[in-house]
Amino acid sequence: MIASCGTQSFTRILTCMLWVVACDMCPLQSQANTTHRASIDLRSGLLNGRPTTDWTLEQVTDSFGRPSAVSNGVADIIGPQLHYHARGLSFWFIPKAKDPDQHLWILTTYLAREWDGTHSAWYEVFAGDVLPAVDANWKQTRLLSEFAGFKPEVKTAEDSKRALQATGMGRTGVSGPQTDFVTYFLGDLRVTFAIEPNTKFVERIVLADESKSHRR
């Protein structure tokens, strides 16, 4: 009889524990479902149907949820950076001193898994939509063909190294970019593909606002 009561009590306790866990998981699941899937149009410079540079920090967090890490800005030189490692995205904003609304300055999309040493986390492969459907299997030649109408330019890692040395920064120990770049412009929006220099596969896409109003 005692054993029977003990078994029944244990069963009730276990049932209650499972119910509590299930209740705790419900709001988490609900929050996850409220975040938006990212869609990036490389021909029009749109993020989820809106101009990339129209997005503000608050709008990004409202749409994409809590970031996995945040990098603080530096005075009025650079603004904060929000990292969404699991989504393969990072958002860098204009300093508040220059733009009270803190509009988006740089959007980076990771097409290949990449280690973020600063935050000890992996940027996972971007799981959203890219138009056209560029992914990590695209090579430089295909990019040049696909976006030929935008007159893309190629800059190698060696080109970047020489440019860095010309400024004198090379003597400070700064190594500079380790990738080649394919770049074109959509008005004031610069679209850049980072290319692995040996295999020529694309690794990430960077959209940056080059307007004078955001660089003053």
Image (cartoon, rainbow, N blue to C red):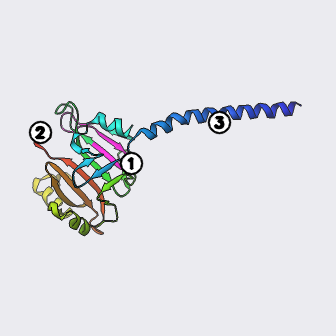
Percent coordinates x, y for residue 211 in the rendering: 13, 44
- Earlier residue among tags 3 and 2: 3
Point out which mark residue 170 bears.
Answer: none
Does residue 203 appear left or right of residue 190 in this picture? right
Position of 211 relative to 124 (above/below) = above
- The CA span between labels 2 and 1 is 30 Å
- Earlier residue among tags 1 and 3: 3
- Residue 98 image-quadrant placement: top left
- Residue 103 image-quadrant placement: top left
Percent coordinates x, y for residue 190 in the rendering: 18, 52
- The one nearer the camera, 139 or 129, is 129
Mark 3 and 2 residues: CB-CB less than 8 Å, in contact? no
- The one nearer the camera, 55 or 163, is 55
Q: Amino acid at mark 3?
A: Leu
At horizontal 27% and vertical 55% (from top left) the residue drawn is: 205
Percent coordinates x, y for residue 49 in the rendering: 27, 46
Magenta-drawn segment: 72-91
Point out which mark residue 87 bears.
Answer: 1
Q: Which part of the image, by quadrant, shows the N terminus? A: top right
- Mark 2 Cα within 10 Å, few/some/many (few <14, many 20+)? few
- Mark 3 Cα within 10 Å, few/some/many (few <14, many 20+)? few
Percent coordinates x, y for residue 209 in the rendering: 18, 46
Q: Amino acid at mark 1?
A: Arg
- Earlier residue among tags 2 and 1: 1
Q: State the SS at label 1.
A: helix
Count of marks, rendered view: 3
Q: Give the residue pinned by disc 3.
A: 18
Q: Give the residue pinned by disc 2.
A: 213
Mark 2 and 1 residues: CB-CB less than 8 Å, in contact? no
Asked whether the viewer can see residue 167, the reply is yes
